[in-house]
Amino acid sequence: MTSQSYYGRNIVKEPVWKREIPLYFWTGGIAGASAVLHGVARVTGNEPLAKRTLFIGAVADAVSPVLLVKDLGRPERFLNMFRMFKVTSPMSVGSWILLVSGGASNTAAALELLGILAPAKRAAELLSAASGPPLATYTGALVANTSIPVWSEARDQLPWLFGASATATAGAAAAVVTPPRYAGPARRAAVLGAVAEAMVMRAMRRRLGFVGEVYDQGAAGKNARAARACTTVGAGLLALAGRRPVAARTGGLLVLAGGLALRFSVFKAGFQSARDPKYTVVPQKERLRARFSASSTG
Amino acid sequence: MSTTTYGSDAKPRVGFFTDTTVCIGCKACEVACKEWNLIPADGLEWTGESYDNTSQLDANTWRHVAFVEQRKPLRIGADGVDAVDGGPEPLRWLMESDVCKHCTHAGCLDACPTGALFRTEFGTVVVQEDVCNGCGYCVPACPFGVIDRRDLPRSPQDAPLALPLLGSKEDGRVWKCTLCYDRLKGGHEPACAKACPTDSIQFGELDELRERAQKRLEKVEREGWNGARLYGEDPDDGVGGFGAFFLLLDEPEVYGLPPDPIVPTRHLPRLWRTTAFAAVGLLVGVAMAFAGGDA
């Protein structure tokens, strides 16, 4: 694919975000899906799993805002995120989701530790479980709502991809710290998430066409390959030997690493996609040509 | 886009018509913009790319003159093929002063989570520097790669950081063309248009500029200018028409402009639906994982 350009310079700008952002996509996903794991575990009476997923979610929820504030150009102005609620801005919506989710899960975890105010704890748990799924998936919308071709063109897949990876990593984290005889749902969530992630990734590559080739190149390619290898082996271990503690721990850690590599892969792909103007120009020219031929024949 | 919230304070929408056929590449617009808006210097580099050593619009460049050297005739005959001038080896030198497009549907403004980016009473798009917290979301949201985060060290006079543990940060805020909001308030035209010696940069009410541009296009077409076209004047395009549009002499991408820009927000309703479905999918998936007991 060749196209004309201005001295080969990029047209859309590369993001200014640093590694805190893909790290947050990972921790936010773990927090969101852990909250759901926790909620269902409570309902089904699996207390050992419920307790651990509550604390995993609370820790991931507490780390997330620190990462986000650190990445701001003006960290001391982080409260400006709450000047308004703007539905046209996934970052605005996401800030509020994280505020609710983090507040709820950390309140619930604190009350659990102190063993007080059971009704308030229950309410916080419910709120945390309800805000978990949007927390795990909105980050896909956040990157898709840009002019970066490899993100924007994958807008039908990215929320699913991040949701699947969130499920896999939250299940994996729980499988690492929960005794295997209580960790069955966590292992199955990890495997289910990993399978869904692989399927969505394939659909995304099909949808992207040549724009998706950045996932085979450079840092995005390296991370994509690492993600696939870690997640596949990790999920395989959990599925086949997950009742053995060593296998559960190894498999869980591999899936967690795979999820992190996946977020870095998507993140880096955006930079590579912005850098080369052909990814911006060629699809837009095709769009113009299609519109022109549609209007001249019809 | 709407300035209706301004009520009786709303002004007619203003913008730029940049006619590249008369640009002489003097860069007076770049200099006037830097001077008026007190934009910091950002390096002295020799790119070897014709006369362009600025390279692109960014946080510290709000007008950028592009230079393109081409083996193409400047004018062609009525049949659209034969070169009228230039002989067997024609050469033409295209110059174009690029600027923020002040889109009718602005991706940067929609993406901004703090409300730092806003629509003025003139229909232009401006950053409030006392509100911007440097989240950077507007940077990849812009289909043109205009808005950018400033990357300069904090000066000792700057207010101390409220969170010193996070280290000394750069300016850290985003910057772009304001269409000289302060000058507009005072009834003056923007500095670049004022400084332009050939009226390549024309400032005015958008409706009037569009009429003027149409007439100009008809004239240069009659004169056989090779590749003349308007870019960004159509209110039905992907960003609802530019507040600052252009008369170009080649495809937009030759000047580093996107051929068919679309504001990301156009896809957002569907994207939110996808996100909601994915959230429900996650819920169902996790619930399914509990089938089959605790072990």
Image: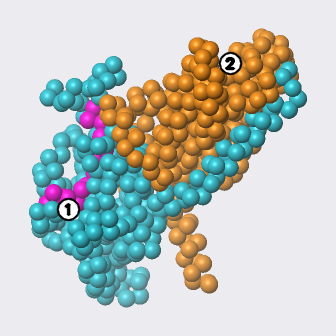
Kind of residue at disc 2:
Arg
Most foreground residue, A188 or A19: A188
User: Image quadrant of residue B25?
Assistant: bottom left
- Can you give x and y, in whole percent of width and height, for residue A259 in the image? 64, 30
Report the quarter where the N terminus of chain A lies.
bottom right
Question: Magenta segment, which residues?
Answer: B170-183
Main SS of residues in magenta: loop
Residue highlighted by disc 1 = B25
Q: Residues within 10 Å of mark 1 (few under 14, many from 20)?
A: many
Q: Check if mark 1's residue and mark 2's residue have beta carbons within 8 Å.
A: no
Residue B194 lies left or right of residue B244; in this view the side is: left
Q: Looking at the image, which residue is at 41% across and 30% down?
A: A69
What residue occupies the far right of the structure in this picture? B292
Chain in orange, by letter, is: A
Q: Looking at the image, which residue is at 32% across and 65% down?
A: B5
Residue A67 lies left or right of residue A254; in this view the side is: left
Chain in cyan, by letter, is: B
Q: Which mark is residue A178?
A: none
Mark 1–mark 2 Cα distance, whole angstroms, equals: 66 Å
Local SS, label 2: helix
Report the quarter where the C terminus of chain A lies.
bottom right
B176 in the magenta segment: yes
Most foreground residue, A8 or A235: A235
- Can you give x and y, in whole percent of width and height, for residue B13 in the image? 27, 71
Above or below for A45 versus B268: above
Subunit of mark 1?
B
